[in-house]
Amino acid sequence: MTTLFDPVQIGAVDAPNRILMAPLTRGRATRDHVPTPIMVDYYRQRASAGLIISEATGISRQGLGWPYAPGIWSDEQVAAWRPVTQAVHDAGGRIIVQLWHMGRQVHSSVTGEQPVSSSATATAGDAHSYEGKKPFETARPLGLDEIPGLIDAYVRAAHNAIAAGFDGIQIHAANGYLIDQFLRDNANFRTDQYGGGVENRVRLLAEVTQAVVDAIGTDRVSVRLSPNGESQGVNDSDPASLFAHAAAVLDAIGIASLELREPGPDGTFGRTDVPRQSPLIRQHFKGPLILNSDYDSDRAQADLASGLADAISFGRPLMANPDLVERFRIGAPLNPTQPMATWYGQGEAGYTDYPTLAQEKADA
Protein backbone atom coordinates (compact mmCIF):
# COMPACT_ATOMS: atom_id res chain seq x y z
CA MET A 1 0.00 0.00 0.00
CA THR A 2 1.28 3.46 -0.90
CA THR A 3 2.01 5.58 2.17
CA LEU A 4 2.72 9.23 2.88
CA PHE A 5 6.36 8.33 3.42
CA ASP A 6 7.00 6.61 0.11
CA PRO A 7 8.98 8.46 -2.56
CA VAL A 8 7.26 9.73 -5.68
CA GLN A 9 8.58 11.03 -8.99
CA ILE A 10 7.04 14.39 -9.90
CA GLY A 11 8.52 15.23 -13.27
CA ALA A 12 12.17 16.10 -12.73
CA VAL A 13 11.72 16.06 -8.95
CA ASP A 14 12.50 12.88 -7.01
CA ALA A 15 10.39 13.60 -3.93
CA PRO A 16 11.40 11.51 -0.88
CA ASN A 17 7.87 11.52 0.55
CA ARG A 18 4.34 12.46 -0.50
CA ILE A 19 3.81 15.21 2.07
CA LEU A 20 4.15 18.36 -0.03
CA MET A 21 4.06 21.99 1.02
CA ALA A 22 1.15 23.86 -0.55
CA PRO A 23 1.62 27.41 -1.86
CA LEU A 24 0.98 29.93 0.92
CA THR A 25 0.94 33.71 0.50
CA ARG A 26 3.00 35.13 3.38
CA GLY A 27 3.95 38.75 2.54
CA ARG A 28 7.58 38.94 3.70
CA ALA A 29 9.13 40.47 0.56
CA THR A 30 9.91 44.17 0.11
CA ARG A 31 7.51 46.79 -1.18
CA ASP A 32 9.22 46.31 -4.55
CA HIS A 33 8.41 42.58 -4.35
CA VAL A 34 12.00 41.45 -3.75
CA PRO A 35 12.53 38.35 -1.55
CA THR A 36 14.19 39.00 1.83
CA PRO A 37 16.62 37.04 4.05
CA ILE A 38 13.88 35.92 6.45
CA MET A 39 12.38 33.96 3.56
CA VAL A 40 15.59 31.93 3.40
CA ASP A 41 15.03 30.71 6.95
CA TYR A 42 11.33 30.04 6.41
CA TYR A 43 11.79 27.77 3.41
CA ARG A 44 14.91 26.07 4.79
CA GLN A 45 12.97 25.09 7.91
CA ARG A 46 10.42 23.19 5.79
CA ALA A 47 12.86 21.40 3.46
CA SER A 48 11.89 17.94 4.78
CA ALA A 49 8.63 18.15 2.81
CA GLY A 50 8.73 15.96 -0.28
CA LEU A 51 8.43 19.11 -2.40
CA ILE A 52 7.91 22.75 -1.50
CA ILE A 53 5.56 24.71 -3.75
CA SER A 54 6.48 28.32 -3.05
CA GLU A 55 4.12 31.12 -2.19
CA ALA A 56 2.39 32.69 -5.19
CA THR A 57 4.97 34.81 -7.01
CA GLY A 58 4.17 37.56 -9.49
CA ILE A 59 5.11 37.21 -13.15
CA SER A 60 4.79 40.96 -13.74
CA ARG A 61 4.03 44.19 -11.96
CA GLN A 62 0.65 44.25 -13.72
CA GLY A 63 -0.33 40.94 -12.16
CA LEU A 64 0.95 41.35 -8.59
CA GLY A 65 -1.29 43.33 -6.28
CA TRP A 66 -0.63 41.65 -2.93
CA PRO A 67 1.42 43.94 -0.65
CA TYR A 68 4.88 42.57 0.15
CA ALA A 69 4.44 39.45 -1.99
CA PRO A 70 7.48 38.43 -4.07
CA GLY A 71 7.88 38.64 -7.81
CA ILE A 72 10.18 36.97 -10.31
CA TRP A 73 10.24 39.33 -13.29
CA SER A 74 13.40 41.34 -12.50
CA ASP A 75 17.10 40.52 -12.18
CA GLU A 76 17.02 41.82 -8.59
CA GLN A 77 14.23 39.42 -7.69
CA VAL A 78 16.01 36.48 -9.32
CA ALA A 79 19.18 37.24 -7.38
CA ALA A 80 17.23 37.46 -4.12
CA TRP A 81 15.53 34.12 -4.73
CA ARG A 82 18.85 32.28 -5.18
CA PRO A 83 19.71 32.14 -1.45
CA VAL A 84 16.25 30.67 -0.82
CA THR A 85 16.58 27.85 -3.33
CA GLN A 86 20.18 27.20 -2.29
CA ALA A 87 19.19 26.93 1.37
CA VAL A 88 16.43 24.44 0.56
CA HIS A 89 18.78 22.36 -1.57
CA ASP A 90 21.53 22.47 1.06
CA ALA A 91 18.99 21.12 3.56
CA GLY A 92 18.17 18.24 1.23
CA GLY A 93 14.91 19.70 -0.09
CA ARG A 94 13.27 20.46 -3.41
CA ILE A 95 11.36 23.61 -4.34
CA ILE A 96 9.31 24.92 -7.27
CA VAL A 97 7.86 28.41 -7.64
CA GLN A 98 4.19 29.16 -8.21
CA LEU A 99 3.73 31.70 -11.02
CA TRP A 100 0.92 34.18 -10.37
CA HIS A 101 -1.10 36.77 -12.25
CA MET A 102 -3.96 38.00 -10.07
CA GLY A 103 -6.08 39.52 -12.84
CA ARG A 104 -8.99 41.51 -11.43
CA GLN A 105 -7.90 40.76 -7.84
CA VAL A 106 -5.32 43.58 -7.86
CA HIS A 107 -5.83 47.24 -7.01
CA SER A 108 -4.42 50.04 -9.12
CA SER A 109 -2.85 51.68 -6.06
CA VAL A 110 -0.47 48.70 -5.91
CA THR A 111 0.13 47.99 -9.60
CA GLY A 112 -0.20 51.49 -11.03
CA GLU A 113 -2.79 50.48 -13.63
CA GLN A 114 -6.38 49.32 -14.02
CA PRO A 115 -6.81 45.58 -13.36
CA VAL A 116 -7.15 43.25 -16.34
CA SER A 117 -9.30 40.14 -16.68
CA SER A 118 -11.10 38.01 -19.23
CA SER A 119 -14.02 40.46 -19.19
CA ALA A 120 -15.09 43.76 -17.65
CA THR A 121 -16.00 42.44 -14.21
CA ALA A 122 -15.22 43.22 -10.58
CA THR A 123 -14.89 41.07 -7.49
CA ALA A 124 -17.23 41.88 -4.62
CA GLY A 125 -15.56 43.19 -1.49
CA ASP A 126 -12.15 44.73 -0.92
CA ALA A 127 -8.68 44.34 -2.38
CA HIS A 128 -5.46 44.48 -0.39
CA SER A 129 -3.30 47.57 -0.73
CA TYR A 130 -0.47 49.27 1.14
CA GLU A 131 -3.01 51.70 2.57
CA GLY A 132 -5.33 48.96 3.81
CA LYS A 133 -8.30 47.40 2.08
CA LYS A 134 -9.96 49.22 -0.82
CA PRO A 135 -13.00 48.29 -2.93
CA PHE A 136 -12.16 46.11 -5.91
CA GLU A 137 -12.12 47.97 -9.21
CA THR A 138 -13.76 46.93 -12.47
CA ALA A 139 -11.23 45.19 -14.67
CA ARG A 140 -10.79 45.87 -18.35
CA PRO A 141 -10.82 42.90 -20.73
CA LEU A 142 -7.43 41.84 -22.02
CA GLY A 143 -7.19 42.64 -25.72
CA LEU A 144 -6.36 39.92 -28.18
CA ASP A 145 -3.20 41.83 -29.04
CA GLU A 146 -2.13 41.70 -25.35
CA ILE A 147 -2.38 37.95 -24.88
CA PRO A 148 0.94 37.12 -26.60
CA GLY A 149 2.63 39.54 -24.22
CA LEU A 150 0.96 37.89 -21.25
CA ILE A 151 2.17 34.48 -22.40
CA ASP A 152 5.66 35.91 -22.86
CA ALA A 153 5.56 37.14 -19.24
CA TYR A 154 4.90 33.60 -18.05
CA VAL A 155 7.76 32.31 -20.19
CA ARG A 156 10.17 34.96 -18.87
CA ALA A 157 9.16 34.15 -15.32
CA ALA A 158 9.75 30.43 -15.96
CA HIS A 159 13.22 31.11 -17.36
CA ASN A 160 13.91 33.35 -14.37
CA ALA A 161 12.77 30.58 -12.03
CA ILE A 162 15.33 28.17 -13.44
CA ALA A 163 18.00 30.89 -13.27
CA ALA A 164 17.07 31.41 -9.60
CA GLY A 165 17.66 27.74 -8.85
CA PHE A 166 14.10 26.45 -8.61
CA ASP A 167 13.49 22.83 -9.57
CA GLY A 168 10.51 23.86 -11.67
CA ILE A 169 7.37 25.99 -11.68
CA GLN A 170 3.67 25.72 -11.00
CA ILE A 171 1.21 27.78 -13.06
CA HIS A 172 -1.41 29.25 -10.72
CA ALA A 173 -4.68 28.66 -12.59
CA ALA A 174 -6.84 28.49 -9.46
CA ASN A 175 -8.48 30.51 -6.69
CA GLY A 176 -10.19 33.11 -8.84
CA TYR A 177 -7.03 34.65 -10.33
CA LEU A 178 -6.44 35.56 -13.97
CA ILE A 179 -6.39 32.15 -15.66
CA ASP A 180 -9.32 31.03 -13.50
CA GLN A 181 -11.16 34.17 -14.62
CA PHE A 182 -10.78 32.92 -18.19
CA LEU A 183 -11.76 29.34 -17.30
CA ARG A 184 -15.07 29.88 -15.55
CA ASP A 185 -18.28 31.09 -17.11
CA ASN A 186 -19.44 33.54 -14.43
CA ALA A 187 -16.36 35.68 -15.10
CA ASN A 188 -15.68 35.11 -18.81
CA PHE A 189 -18.17 36.76 -21.19
CA ARG A 190 -15.87 37.02 -24.20
CA THR A 191 -17.15 36.36 -27.70
CA ASP A 192 -13.75 35.69 -29.30
CA GLN A 193 -11.64 32.51 -29.31
CA TYR A 194 -11.03 32.81 -25.56
CA GLY A 195 -14.70 32.85 -24.55
CA GLY A 196 -17.91 30.90 -24.98
CA GLY A 197 -17.57 27.12 -24.93
CA VAL A 198 -15.33 25.06 -22.71
CA GLU A 199 -12.66 24.60 -25.39
CA ASN A 200 -12.31 28.35 -25.82
CA ARG A 201 -12.25 29.12 -22.11
CA VAL A 202 -9.47 26.56 -21.57
CA ARG A 203 -7.46 28.05 -24.45
CA LEU A 204 -5.43 30.54 -22.38
CA LEU A 205 -4.46 27.87 -19.84
CA ALA A 206 -3.41 25.58 -22.67
CA GLU A 207 -1.39 28.25 -24.47
CA VAL A 208 0.39 29.44 -21.32
CA THR A 209 1.19 25.88 -20.28
CA GLN A 210 2.44 24.84 -23.72
CA ALA A 211 4.63 27.95 -24.01
CA VAL A 212 6.20 27.37 -20.59
CA VAL A 213 6.70 23.66 -21.36
CA ASP A 214 8.43 24.61 -24.61
CA ALA A 215 10.67 26.96 -22.63
CA ILE A 216 11.78 24.77 -19.71
CA GLY A 217 10.48 21.23 -20.38
CA THR A 218 7.42 19.19 -19.45
CA ASP A 219 9.15 17.66 -16.43
CA ARG A 220 9.49 21.05 -14.73
CA VAL A 221 5.97 22.44 -15.27
CA SER A 222 2.98 21.85 -13.00
CA VAL A 223 -0.46 23.46 -12.74
CA ARG A 224 -2.86 24.25 -9.89
CA LEU A 225 -6.67 24.27 -10.37
CA SER A 226 -9.58 24.85 -7.97
CA PRO A 227 -12.33 22.88 -9.73
CA ASN A 228 -15.19 22.77 -7.22
CA GLY A 229 -17.19 25.76 -6.16
CA GLU A 230 -16.77 29.49 -5.93
CA SER A 231 -13.36 31.06 -5.28
CA GLN A 232 -13.03 34.81 -4.79
CA GLY A 233 -16.20 35.40 -6.78
CA VAL A 234 -15.27 33.10 -9.67
CA ASN A 235 -17.46 30.08 -10.37
CA ASP A 236 -18.74 27.84 -13.15
CA SER A 237 -22.15 26.44 -13.97
CA ASP A 238 -20.77 23.09 -15.21
CA PRO A 239 -17.48 22.35 -13.47
CA ALA A 240 -17.44 18.70 -14.49
CA SER A 241 -17.35 19.46 -18.22
CA LEU A 242 -14.92 22.34 -17.81
CA PHE A 243 -12.35 20.65 -15.65
CA ALA A 244 -12.54 17.27 -17.34
CA HIS A 245 -11.58 19.03 -20.55
CA ALA A 246 -8.86 21.08 -18.83
CA ALA A 247 -7.42 17.92 -17.29
CA ALA A 248 -7.38 16.15 -20.65
CA VAL A 249 -5.61 19.10 -22.28
CA LEU A 250 -2.98 19.21 -19.54
CA ASP A 251 -2.52 15.44 -19.76
CA ALA A 252 -1.91 15.72 -23.51
CA ILE A 253 0.72 18.42 -22.92
CA GLY A 254 2.37 16.07 -20.42
CA ILE A 255 2.91 18.32 -17.41
CA ALA A 256 4.82 17.08 -14.35
CA SER A 257 1.85 17.23 -11.96
CA LEU A 258 -1.59 18.69 -11.36
CA GLU A 259 -2.59 20.06 -7.94
CA LEU A 260 -6.26 20.50 -7.01
CA ARG A 261 -7.54 22.71 -4.23
CA GLU A 262 -10.83 21.11 -3.20
CA PRO A 263 -12.60 22.58 -0.16
CA GLY A 264 -15.58 20.68 1.22
CA PRO A 265 -18.87 21.73 2.81
CA ASP A 266 -17.16 22.04 6.19
CA GLY A 267 -13.96 23.65 4.91
CA THR A 268 -12.00 25.76 7.35
CA PHE A 269 -10.66 28.18 4.73
CA GLY A 270 -13.44 28.31 2.15
CA ARG A 271 -16.30 25.87 1.80
CA THR A 272 -18.67 24.65 -0.90
CA ASP A 273 -21.39 22.09 -1.52
CA VAL A 274 -20.11 21.46 -5.05
CA PRO A 275 -18.73 17.89 -5.11
CA ARG A 276 -15.02 17.25 -5.41
CA GLN A 277 -14.00 16.87 -9.05
CA SER A 278 -10.85 14.85 -8.37
CA PRO A 279 -12.43 11.43 -9.12
CA LEU A 280 -13.49 12.71 -12.55
CA ILE A 281 -10.22 14.52 -13.17
CA ARG A 282 -8.32 11.36 -12.24
CA GLN A 283 -9.95 9.69 -15.26
CA HIS A 284 -8.58 12.35 -17.61
CA PHE A 285 -5.20 13.19 -16.08
CA LYS A 286 -2.78 10.27 -15.80
CA GLY A 287 0.22 12.10 -14.33
CA PRO A 288 0.90 12.71 -10.63
CA LEU A 289 -2.24 14.16 -9.01
CA ILE A 290 -1.79 16.24 -5.86
CA LEU A 291 -4.81 16.97 -3.67
CA ASN A 292 -5.21 19.81 -1.16
CA SER A 293 -7.59 21.28 1.44
CA ASP A 294 -8.19 20.38 5.08
CA TYR A 295 -6.25 17.13 5.05
CA ASP A 296 -5.02 15.40 8.18
CA SER A 297 -2.70 12.39 8.05
CA ASP A 298 -5.51 9.81 8.15
CA ARG A 299 -7.52 11.34 5.33
CA ALA A 300 -4.35 11.87 3.31
CA GLN A 301 -3.34 8.25 3.75
CA ALA A 302 -6.79 7.09 2.68
CA ASP A 303 -6.71 9.06 -0.60
CA LEU A 304 -3.22 7.75 -1.36
CA ALA A 305 -4.21 4.17 -0.59
CA SER A 306 -7.29 4.36 -2.82
CA GLY A 307 -5.23 5.62 -5.74
CA LEU A 308 -7.16 8.89 -5.96
CA ALA A 309 -4.04 10.93 -5.14
CA ASP A 310 -0.31 10.49 -5.68
CA ALA A 311 0.61 13.11 -3.07
CA ILE A 312 -1.09 15.53 -0.68
CA SER A 313 -0.15 19.19 -0.22
CA PHE A 314 -0.49 20.71 3.23
CA GLY A 315 -0.75 24.45 3.83
CA ARG A 316 -1.43 25.58 7.38
CA PRO A 317 -0.13 22.33 8.94
CA LEU A 318 3.27 22.93 7.31
CA MET A 319 3.09 26.61 8.14
CA ALA A 320 2.80 25.77 11.83
CA ASN A 321 4.93 22.61 11.82
CA PRO A 322 8.19 22.89 9.88
CA ASP A 323 8.87 19.23 10.76
CA LEU A 324 5.40 18.01 9.76
CA VAL A 325 6.83 14.92 8.03
CA GLU A 326 8.44 13.74 11.26
CA ARG A 327 5.39 14.59 13.35
CA PHE A 328 3.19 12.53 11.02
CA ARG A 329 5.73 9.71 11.02
CA ILE A 330 5.73 9.28 14.81
CA GLY A 331 2.20 10.50 15.53
CA ALA A 332 3.35 13.57 17.46
CA PRO A 333 0.90 16.39 18.25
CA LEU A 334 0.86 19.41 15.93
CA ASN A 335 1.52 23.03 16.76
CA PRO A 336 -1.59 25.21 16.46
CA THR A 337 -1.53 27.87 13.77
CA GLN A 338 -0.94 31.37 15.08
CA PRO A 339 -3.60 34.07 14.40
CA MET A 340 -4.27 35.11 10.80
CA ALA A 341 -2.81 38.55 11.49
CA THR A 342 0.62 36.88 11.56
CA TRP A 343 0.16 35.07 8.25
CA TYR A 344 0.64 38.11 6.05
CA GLY A 345 2.50 40.54 8.31
CA GLN A 346 6.20 41.25 8.25
CA GLY A 347 8.59 39.75 10.78
CA GLU A 348 9.24 36.40 12.47
CA ALA A 349 5.96 36.03 14.35
CA GLY A 350 3.89 33.26 12.82
CA TYR A 351 6.59 32.73 10.21
CA THR A 352 9.93 31.39 11.43
CA ASP A 353 9.15 31.04 15.16
CA TYR A 354 7.19 27.76 15.14
CA PRO A 355 9.07 25.16 17.22
CA THR A 356 10.20 21.79 15.91
CA LEU A 357 10.18 18.61 17.99
CA ALA A 358 13.96 18.90 18.33
CA GLN A 359 13.64 22.43 19.68
CA GLU A 360 10.94 21.39 22.09
CA LYS A 361 13.12 18.57 23.37
CA ALA A 362 16.12 20.87 23.78
CA ASP A 363 14.01 23.38 25.73
CA ALA A 364 12.47 20.74 28.01
Image: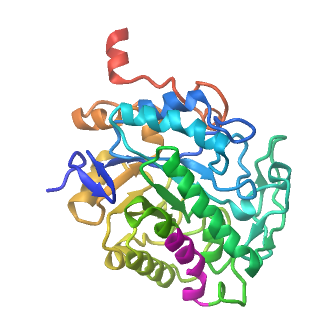
Q: Quick one: quadrant of the C terminus? A: top left
User: Which of the two residues, 87 or 298, is positioned nearer the viewer here?
Assistant: 87
Q: Position of residue 255 (x, y in %)?
A: 40, 68
Q: Position of residue 276 (x, y in %)?
A: 42, 69
Q: Is residue 78 left or right of residue 61?
A: left
Q: Residue at x 42, y 30 (%)?
A: 45
Picture quadrant of residue 79: top right
The answer, for residue 138, to whether it is visible in the render is yes
Give above or below for 18 relative to 274: above
Q: Quick one: quadrant of the N terminus? A: bottom left
Q: Position of residue 257 (x, y in %)?
A: 38, 63
Asked whether 203 falls inside the magenta stretch, the response is yes
Q: Residue at x 65, y 47 (%)?
A: 71
Asked whether 182 falls inside the magenta stretch, the response is no
Q: Is residue 352 left or right of residue 303?
A: right
User: Which of the two residues, 31 or 66, is positioned nearer the viewer here?
Assistant: 31
User: Which of the two residues, 128 or 269, is positioned nearer the viewer here?
Assistant: 128
Q: Residue at x 75, y 64 (%)?
A: 123
Magenta residue span: 197-211
Give above or below for 142 relative to 46: below
Give above or below for 10 relative to 208: above
The answer, for residue 337, to whether it is visible in the render is no
